[in-house]
Amino acid sequence: GKHNNWSLSTDTGVNFLSPGKNPSENSLFLLTLAAVIRAVDEHQDLLRISVATAGNDHRLG
């Protein structure tokens, strides 16, 4: 199947999806991860509408 790679970063190069080397450096990563999980949970209907096709529904069951 197809997939889409994506990232989140600032204009200065700070990558929001890069875990730190120790627990104290993980706060930005963990906050971003929690926000993405919540957004997917809250807006799953919109995500489904934007990616669903009859072919995928038939193929995936």
Image: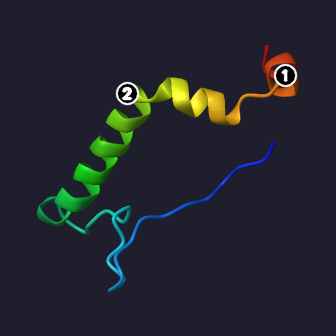
In the displayed structure, 42 sits above or below 37; it is: above
Q: Is mark 2 on a helix, strand or loop?
A: helix
Q: Is residue 61 above or below residue 19?
A: above
Q: Is residue 13 above or below residue 51?
A: below
Instruction: Give the amino acid type for the residue marked by disc 1 in the picture.
Output: Ala
The residue lying toward the viewer, choosing from 11 and 32, is 11
**Which quadrant is the C terminus positioned in?**
top right
Distance from the alpha carbon under mark 1 to that under mark 2? 24 Å
Residue shown at the point (84%, 22%) measured from the top left: 54
Q: Residue at x 28, y 42 (%)?
A: 34
The quarter holding residue 27 reads bottom left
x and y percent of residue 31 in the render? 23, 51
Residue 42, numbered label? 2
- The amino acid marked with disc number 2 is Glu
- Residue at image point 16% right, 58% down: 23
Residue most extreme to the left = 24
Q: Where is residue 2 in the image (x, y as percent from the top left)?
A: 78, 47
Q: Please report whichever mark, 1 or 2, sits nearer to the chain's N-terminal start.
A: 2
